[in-house]
Image: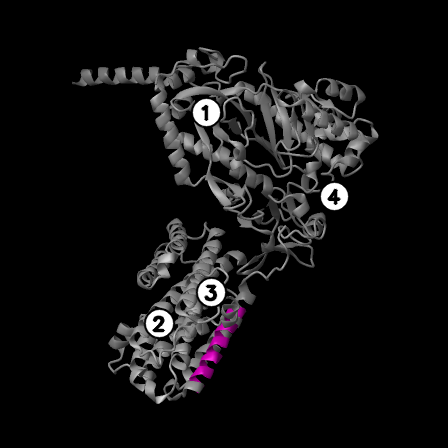
Amino acid sequence: MLSRVAENLYWLARYVERAENTARIVNVNANLLLDLPKGIAPGWKPLVDITGANELFEEHYKDYGERQVMRFLLGDERHPGSIRSALEAARENCRTIRDFVPREAWEQINGLTLYARDGLQKGLTKNGRHSYLRGLITHSQLINGLLDGTMLHDQGFEFLSLGRYIERADMTTRIADVHSASLLPDADEARPYDNIQWVSVLKSLTAYQMYRRSTQIRVQRGPVLGFIFKSPRFPRSLRWCIDHSRICLERLPRNEGCLRVNGRLARALDSAELEGFSQKALHDFIDELQLGIADLHEEIAQTWFPPRVTAVAA
Amino acid sequence: MEINWSDYDCDGFYDELLAARGEPRPEVDALAADIQALGGDELMTRQLAAEVSIKEMGITFTVYSEEGGAIDRAWPFDVIPRVIPEREWRQVELGLKQRVQALNLFIDDIYHEQRIVQDGVFPREVLEKSVNFRPQCVGIDPPLGIWAHICGSDLVRDADGTLYVLEDNLRVPSGVSYMLENRLVTKRVFPELFEHYAPLPVDDYPSQLFDTLASLSPRPAEYPEVVVLTPGIYNSAYFEHAYLAQQMGAELVEGRDLFVDEDDCCYMRTVDGPARVDVIYRRVDDLFLDPEAFREDSALGVAGLMRAWKAGNVALANAPGAGVADDKVVYAFVPEIIKYYLDQEPIVPNVPTYRCMEPDALQYVLEHMAELVVKPANESGGYGMLVGPASTQAERDRMAAAIKKDPRNYIAQPTLKLSTVPTVIKDRLEPRHVDLRPFILSADRQQVTMGGLTRVALRKGSLVVNSSQGGGSKDTWILPQDSATETYEQVQGETGQRQSQSSSATG
């Protein structure tokens, strides 16, 4: 299989996953804000913090108001991490490799891009938001399901899955980071709302119900962190993403370097005593994990993807 | 609406199906009767079915527009086939092989001793001014001495019925995928007529192409790695590149998928590591092929590819520099080229051509410009061309000045009355002008497509057959000598009768 095709498949999956996770984060934050008293509600800035695009945001917007952040995350074409940009990029990646994905999947990706574009104005309104975002999430899930269920499970599929797990791992750590470190201050007056905060973390990962089923204890920081980082059964946990990306890597040739980086990441996760971490320690640990995920991506790109070209198009 | 050939106004032109209004040509009169019997409504239904098939099959061509970026458009197609009797076609086939063989000898000579120039048959100044001559190719010996492995020659028929070669495309001719797809659509839409008349098959082109390419491999002992090199999805012929790659089971690659290593071999970047490439069917123009040798700013090509090719480690089809022979002034010399290398007369003639570099011809062209078509040497797609009968005095004056300034760069030809084929226009049949592009493969042996791509100008009276400018296409039927002479209707009628007889006998 051509390296370029492998790379296109990988990014196709990453971009779809990114769009889906961004929709999840926005949706849950909107709900959370309704539950928190105005005085301590952290507002919308943390969502931009999650994507790490503060500089770009501040270049184009005066303040972190709801409308501004919404537009930035949902529909701003200048922001490469917006849902709109991610989906356009997914579509472009898919376009060149239409021979490799089932026609229905291409049609759905095309359809999702159009949905995101056409429904944007409605999605930016307070009462249109929820159904718009739900649509995005469901549609992304549909694409994943279609690919799983109809595509040849060959090398190309491994790259598709790798892209999905790596993006998901990255987004899961970001969600945990922001909710745990910056959404709410460590101050006493926030304590009564601690519970709500962790419920919202779970909900942004569609993990609430599954958490309840797998752990009988009430929602609190330690077990929630344990669940979203370490659960071997929950498909959006970091543990799951690392394990499953390893399975993909094992099926690919020349995988030694990538397996080593993947193993390092797995060991870092295993050895961490998450429950005892202070906010600060948790934040540092998440930083470390994110660097590890970035390393894994780098190693994958180095091993299998074509070198980056900077030449001007003729 | 009823179809009646006596309503079909093809006077003044050579029609491929009818000798004159109301008179089908003897070799195809059964088919003409069958088409007439279908009637206008049925033809319209079939035309619609064809258009639906084309959408479903995803046969598209790409048009680039300012606002919308690249758009895939459905391929315009007309269901009435263009028919050529096998007897005539076999002659054309011989003529095309002869022509391409001579052109390949010419190109090889031009990049070596240039005997044809030394012998005074081909003027040196024509060569010196050719924009498609590549000094980088001088002295190179491509496999089998062949430069133009895939040639697409455009044929047109004039009012007197003579088929002429209008031009040869020796660089990256396109259209063959549409020839193949048109056939598939016709089989779906006219299964009964197709079975009855049994036109000769075209479907083996992809495997012939693969064999042609594989025979060029520098590693003949092993299974060769053949790839199709495309400029990418925004190219107007991308559909064809993807289609041919798929049909041949070859990898479709872009420039960045390939690299040339220090061993001067070409590799493709795969998930399993570098994989040696033996033959590149390149659909990228010469000048973009290798930034080391040609345009430095090209991102479509592969740095070092010319090095690898010169070293004989990778074969390129067509060979760089092959375009030197599809210059329009060179075209004017093809009869001499055939004579010089093969000592034969051309089997399929050139359109009579005035070479403005010759004083007598120049004089004639300047005096008769209103009747002629004047073409600059190295433009394609009709760019910079003057069609005399449709031109204004001011346009002719401008052209006259341009010719006088650089006579070498111009040729002129009489305005041809392109032949017509019945075409479905709403629920009627009307004559529309056509040309024909057969494809000639040359390597260890030569093969010609059975027919080719018939392009049709869908606008009334128009001679422009380009798909980007309102042109469409038709299936091309080469009818075998033993093709049915009775109509499908008659045969059906008889079988129907026999069946009813036998049923009464048993009943």
Q: Which residues are magenta?
A: A281-298
Output the chain of dot 2.
Answer: A
Three-letter amino acid code of the residue under disc 4: Cys
Of all residues, the one furthest to the left in this rendering is B507
Picture disc at residue A29: 2
Three-letter amino acid code of the residue under disc 2: Asn
Q: Main secondary structure of the magenta part?
A: helix
Left or right, B403 with respect to B380, comes to right
User: Do the residues at pointers 4 and 1 share their chain?
Assistant: yes
Residue under circle 4? B137
User: Which class describes the residues within 10 Å of circle 1: few (<14), some (14-19), or many (20+)?
Assistant: many
Compute the Cα span from label 4 to label 2: 65 Å
Q: Pick whichever, B55 or B347, lies toward us.
A: B55
| Closer to viewer: mark 1 or mark 2 | 2
Residue under circle 3? A81
Number of labels in the image equals 4
Q: Is residue B37 visible?
A: yes
User: Which class describes the residues within 10 Å of circle 3: few (<14), some (14-19), or many (20+)?
Assistant: many
Task: Give the residue displayed 63% in from the left and 20% down from the top.
Answer: B389
| Closer to viewer: mark 4 or mark 3 | 3
User: Which class describes the residues within 10 Å of circle 4: few (<14), some (14-19), or many (20+)?
Assistant: many
Compute the Cα span from label 3 to label 1: 52 Å
Q: Is residue B136 above or below residue B361?
A: below
Task: Give the residue displayed 72% in from the left and 35% down from the top.
Answer: B107
Residue under circle 1? B81
Quadrant in the picture for residue A191 = bottom left
Q: Is residue B450 visible?
A: no
Quadrant in the picture for residue B56 = top left
Output the chain of dot 4.
Answer: B
Compute the Cα span from label 4 to label 1: 42 Å
Q: Pick whichever, B487 or B173, lies toward us.
A: B173
User: Do the residues at pointers 1 and 2 share their chain?
Assistant: no
